Amino acid sequence: MIASGSNPRAAMNNDELIERQQRLLVRSAQLRLILADQAQVLQKPLAMADQAQSGVQWLYRNPLWPLGALALVALVRPRRAMAWGGRLWWAWKTLKQTQKWLTKRPLQKQLP
């Protein structure tokens, strides 16, 4: 058993504990307000990220709409569609090759 003199809070009476609890509750409310104020900076970027995520999800659920738009562009502007198609194909291959190269490359120690 621990002696009551070793823990100063054990000697606190009920009124002191209630007062301490009230101070902690006030401090907690202040910190929540500060956090809410500081989080306002992130509201717009996070909203944009949510919109982008929603757009990607829509594309996965409705793949025919973008494919139809691409087919229309290919019919109306075939040269432009071929030029952009070639560029996109090259970018896709480069991305995949880079990913493959990065996965095969051993991790190097970071110098301090």
Image (tube, rainbow, N blue to C red):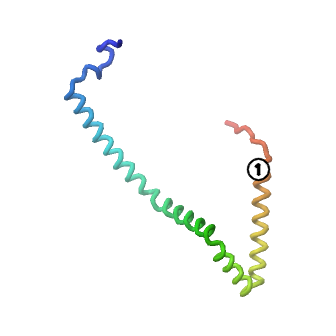
Farthest bottom residue in view: 76
Quarter of the image holding residue 63?
bottom right
At a point 29% along the width and 23% down the height, the residue shown is 9
At a point 28% along the width and 20% down the height, the residue shown is 10
At a point 79% along the width and 73% down the height, the residue shown is 86
Tell me where residue 94 appears, x and y as whole percent.
78, 61
For residue 17, above or below residue 30: above
Q: Secondary structure at mark 1?
A: helix
Q: Is residue 104 left or right of residue 59?
A: right
Farthest left residue in view: 15
At a point 57% along the width and 68% down the height, the residue shown is 55
Of the 4 image quadrants, the one containing the N terminus is top left
Q: Can you identify the residue that label 1 sits on?
A: 102
Quarter of the image holding residue 84?
bottom right
Tell me where residue 79 appears, x and y as whole percent.
78, 83
- Local packing at callout 1 (Cα closer than 10 Å; few below 14, some 14-19, many 20+) is few
Tell me where residue 18 appears, x and y as whole percent.
23, 32
Q: Is residue 29 left or right of residue 64?
A: left
| Amino acid bearing label 1 | Leu
Of the 4 image quadrants, the one containing the C terminus is top right
Tell me where residue 104 appears, x and y as whole percent.
80, 47
Q: Is residue 94 left or right of residue 69?
A: right
